[in-house]
Image (cartoon, grey):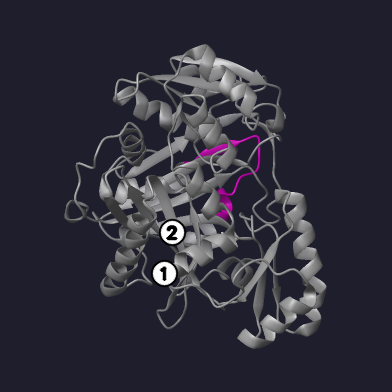
Amino acid sequence: MFGKVLIANRGEIALRVVRSCKELGIKSVAVYSDVDRESLHVAFADESVCIGPADSGKSYRNIKNIIAAAEIAQADAIHPGYGFLAENAEFARICEECGFTFIGPSSEHIEIMGNKSTAKKTMHKLGVPVVPGSDGPVKTINEGLELAKEIGFPVIIKASAGGGGKGMRIAGNDITFRNNFDLARGEAGQAFGNDEVYVEKYIESPRHIEVQVFGDHYGNALHFFERECSIQRRHQKLLEEAPSLGVSDKLRRRMGDISVAAVKALKYRNAGTVEYLLDKNGNFYFMEMNTRIQVEHPVTEMLTGIDLVKLQLSVAAGEEFSLKQKDIKMQGHAMECRINAEDSVTFRPFPGTITAYNAPGGYGVRVDSGAYNDYRVLPNYDSMIAKLIVLGKNRTEAIAIMRRALDEFIIHGINTSIPLHKKITEHFAFVDGTFSTDFIERYFA
């Protein structure tokens, strides 16, 4: 096992990794921008290094500064968390070249899965169901329009290097396709520095289901069941739960088996998430693979009782799985609400100072957060300030615990998404499980 791990991130995920390191007896090194000096991940890590100013491009996304910090701290390994450089193949490659173990998959796997059209082709070859669409990037409007007519409208135009809902446009006919093609390319180029797009069939009112997978260095692969991620706004997840009401036991086994087979065939190592769209007829289609730990990983940890960050560390250190697939069990029903500093109607970020803070507690409640009383929510970074996770013996109990915990969660001084989460957990379509990815647009637009 490693002696010292540098965490190339901030906020709750950096604090999350610090905690697992401490429990494993590993020294942790926090990095921080000059506006993050008073953050909890800095306070609780064993060591800390300032890596630059508030601008993430000069600090948390600055590869040279992070590598220099790892060298100064004499770290053995680097954990990227999620966001920032977590899925940057160049960063993973430089870590490897500089002698640091990158706690995640290989740079090659990050590169393959980072390009959505390449990932789709790769998974299709491995027997994973994919949404009908282009085999690779579509160069021109006319080429895309011809394909759209072939597979049938509606279609969706997606950034090849995309994520987070950026560079995505839906077209229902020739005219909207022509209007949206260049818009999608422009958004993709601005957001990712790559304006390539691909076209695929738009699955109407699907559920968004993802399967948590892991691979080790010995050809073993495991899945940790699925997570339901259909409650989202603007393609950004708001609430996740597991297991999914839309997935039967038979379908769960099939999705798990196919995902594990792909991990083995790829010789993929460490944590990953295979994301699918599930249609009304029970057909599922590969959407993308995230080559990192997910924001919503605590849902799976609560459901299975397994610390996924510790598993990341052990796999990266070269240890073989001590688990078998039969050892991984579902224990009740877990749910997570992402608490964002934003207006709950417009979703606009709402930075500012928290003047009062009380995190909920009690049986079945977990809060992952770097916030506290007088904490400054900065405009420079993502607006998520906490994750509220609950576990009940079944979904009905999990919803009841979540409602109670949301009532207890006090954050004053800024606007948060807590009021929206209260409305979601009380809505009939959420309670009876008849929702899909258009839930927010349908009921809260």
User: Quick one: 330 or 410, which is closer to the camera?
Assistant: 330
Is residue 126 left or right of 42 when viewed as pictured?
left
Q: Does the magenta segment cover residue 411?
A: yes
Q: Does the magenta segment cover residue 361?
A: no
Identify the residue shown where x is 63% and y is 40%: 382
Task: Quadrant for residue 225, please give it.
Answer: bottom left
Q: Amino acid under label 1?
A: Val
Mark on residue 274?
2
Task: Quadrant for residue 368, please give it.
Answer: top left
Identify the residue shown where x is 67% and y is 19%: 34
Mark on residue 128?
1
Q: Secondary structure at mark 1?
A: loop
Identify the mark nearer the N-term, 2 or 1. Answer: 1
Is residue 355 left or right of 222 when viewed as pictured?
right
Q: Position of residue 337 (x, y in %)?
A: 48, 50
Question: Is residue 311 something one can see in this rendering?
Answer: yes
Q: Position of residue 37 (x, y in %)?
A: 60, 18
Q: What is the CA distance from the residue labelled 2 to the residue labelled 1? A: 10 Å
Q: Amino acid under label 2?
A: Val
Q: Position of residue 49 (x, y in %)?
A: 56, 15
Callout 2–callout 1 Cβ contact below 8 Å = yes
User: Quick one: 354 or 41, which is closer to the camera?
Assistant: 41
Magenta stretch in the rendered image: 409-421
